[in-house]
Amino acid sequence: MSRRNIVAGNWKMNLDRAKATELAQAVAGRHAEAGSVELVLCPPSVYLAAVGSAVGLAANGTSPSGVAVGAQNMHDKASGAFTGEIAPPMLVDIGCRFVILGHSERRTLFGETDATVNTKTKAALAAGLTPIVCVGETLEEREGNRTQAVVTTQINGSLAGLSPSDLEKIVVAYEPVWAIGTGKVATPQQAQEVHALIRGLLASLASPAVAAKVRIQYGGSVKPDNAADLAAQPDIDGALVGGASLKADDFLGIAKAFA
Ligand code: PEP
């Protein structure tokens, strides 16, 4: 089963409008360097429209370069009295095709649980967005030999109740918390082991055929010089990139490793 690798940039709360536009134009202009890899840019929400224009996004979320745009979070309701929140159909309305859900910063700093992620995942799918569902253990959990148990709970909780046809549409990002923004990347073997576990869990939730279609990204201090070894692993289908996604050279260098 061949899966199309996907490399997404999580810009977090960085850049300003001019720099976001410049970075998006650079990535779109050089997209050919990434070959067949699907590229997704996830700027802060206030810059989604500017980044969409910079990559030439059409109303249906496609662009001439193939570069797609995603949000970093969303609310689970379609509309209503939720001051400060953004609804899934609003993201679709401005051409977003992806949304990152359950990033470790959302889980730790904003109290998101597997139940929250589950509700949001269903809402994203209902709106026609592709959720990038993030899971991963802390250093304490890894050192306590609890990685498998923690990731199993997160996957089963975050994806509970999804139909097989919905499950095959999602992207999962395995992001060990100890590797995010720390410069400490998981070894390709450590990452592959958890990716294989996740694929097995997806097979139990749906079927091996569905699990074989789901793209599983690795995230956590991915850089151009460590991406190739990760890309060589059979169950690693791309990367979710934080810091290195803020520079076109680094982001495209990582994408090239997955091409
Ligand atoms: C992330 O926050 O999703 C991430 C992977 O960050 P970094 O690449 O900076 O470790």
Image (cartoon, rainbow, N blue to C red):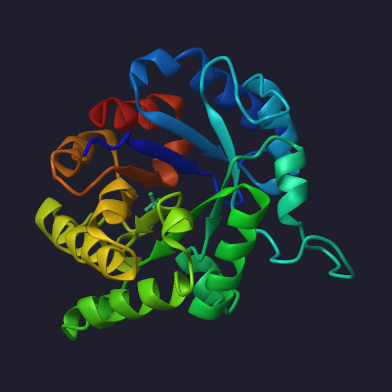
In the image, is 34 to the left or to the right of 53? left
Q: Is residue 86 above or below residue 147?
A: above
Q: Position of residue 12 (x, y in %)?
A: 56, 51
Q: Is 116 in front, or is 160? A: 160
Q: Quadrant of residue 95?
A: top right
Q: Which residue is drawn at 28% across and 55% down?
A: 211
Q: Quadrant of residue 179?
A: bottom left
Q: Position of residue 150 (x, y in %)?
A: 30, 80
Q: Which residue is drawn at 77% across and 40% down?
A: 93
Q: In which quarter of the image is residue 230?
A: top left
Q: Position of residue 180 (x, y in %)?
A: 36, 59
* Direction left: furthest residue: 189
Q: Residue at x 77, y 48 (%)?
A: 90
From where the camera sits, is residue 138 visible?
Answer: no
Q: Is residue 85 above or below residue 20?
A: below
Q: Quadrant of the C terminus?
A: top left
Q: Quadrant of the N terminus?
A: top left
Q: Is 46 in front, or is 2? A: 2
Q: Residue at x 39, y 13 (%)?
A: 32
Q: Position of residue 7 (x, y in %)?
A: 39, 37
Q: Is residue 248 above or below residue 117?
A: above
In the image, is 145 to the left or to the right of 254? left
From where the camera sits, is residue 5 visible?
Answer: yes
